[in-house]
Amino acid sequence: MMRSTFSFLFLLMLFNCENSTDAVGDASLKTTPHVVSEKNKLSKEQQLMASRIDSMFKKFYQMRQFNGAVLVAKAGKIIYKNNFGIQNKSDNSALNDSSMFQLASISKVITATAVLLLHERKLINLNKDVSEYLPDFPYKNIKVKELLSHRSGLPNYLYVLNSELYIPEYRMSNEDMYKRIVAKKPGLYYKPNRRFNYCNTNYALLALLVEKISGKPYSQFLKDEIFTPLGMKHTATIRDINLEEKNVTRPYDQRWRPVDFDASDYVLGDKSIYSTAYDLFLFSEAMYQNRILKPETQALAYTAFSKEIRQHNYGYGWRMKNFKDPIKKEVYHNGWWHGYRTAFHRRLSDTLTVVILSNQLNKTTYHTYKVYDILDNTNQVVLGEDVDQ
């Protein structure tokens, strides 16, 4: 008992002290210490959770398996927040709370939210054919809801337009993408609504629908309706930021080689929103508090629409785990794009939020299940000793 108590107190002392970690490669790197405000002090149990999460990501970092930002919150309280590594290898600048990461496919969550906002305002009917909003759309009987749920059967523009994506200095717009698809009219992969088929074309078209229906550029609509109202000060699409700005992270492969962009980086909706772990926390909390979408609209977004998928499933912009269990049900989206790997997970029953963002191709970004294991098993200390015997 005394040994357990001493171990627990020692861990808490380590956790509350400022720290730095070993360098990665030739870079001199620092991590930002976790700070809890006086108004938001953690319970002993939460401090133990934070300590264990911190130990895990420090180990990943020291083993050169993680470079990025982590945030874990529950019931509106941030339990853990930290940054590991660098945002720009050219000057060895350290990641900080304002470091903006390309969200990759987490952007689909925000695109779906924008579409559902227009749905709530009765400006878009999810059951209508896409061709009713885009008159020259070359495919019949594809509904808006089938874009949202990846059941359209459309081909992926990233493959269909592969040669166009590598035109030097070309920044393809959603309108460009659409016109090229209309001109080529590639064959469908599947008959509409036949089965689930994850496809970036769906969400690039949804961003275009947002523009056509709202009368605003997609980037401006997100800024006016989501980012600014929620206080997401460090969130914007690639078209609204300067990639050379200090707090915009640069992407790298596993050997710390810079990853080049191509024309598709400027197609929005399916990717190319930049944000921070904290801003995604604000977004998640606003969803929990029904400040963005009504509860019934969120319930629709978290509905499993592909009955042929038995384990994981997809709603409107959200993937799902344990979707048949109201206690364990998790809604999430991961991302992987040009050197970035990202994870944004939420467990609805206890209003949990887990955000892991990396500007390097680190597989540990997707180890959210290990965070869940720590949060759900707080009776054991890191070394396997019980807090109380």
Image (cartoon, grey):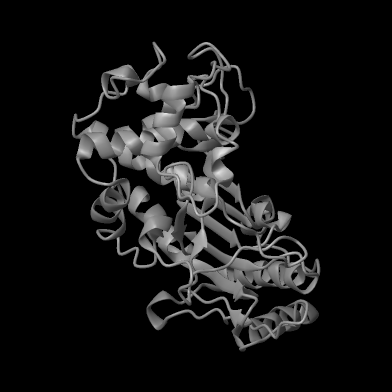
Q: Residue at x 67, y 63 (%)?
A: 252
Rendered-image quadrant of the N terminus: bottom right
Residue 204 found in image quarter: top left
x then y, percent, for residue 251: 61, 63
x then y, percent, for residue 317: 45, 37
x then y, percent, for residue 198: 57, 30
Q: Specify whether residue 135 is in view.
A: yes
Q: Residue at x 57, y 24 (%)?
A: 197
Residue 46 as seen in the image, left or right of residue 20: left
Residue 270 or residue 179, whichever sits in front: 179
x then y, percent, for residue 231: 30, 64
Q: Residue at x 62, y 58 (%)?
A: 260
Q: Residue at x 53, y 32 (%)?
A: 157
Residue 25 found in image quarter: bottom right
Residue 100 or residue 281, whichever sits in front: 100
Rendered-image quadrant of the C terminus: bottom right
Q: Specify whether residue 302 is in view.
A: no
Residue 37 or residue 135, whichever sits in front: 135
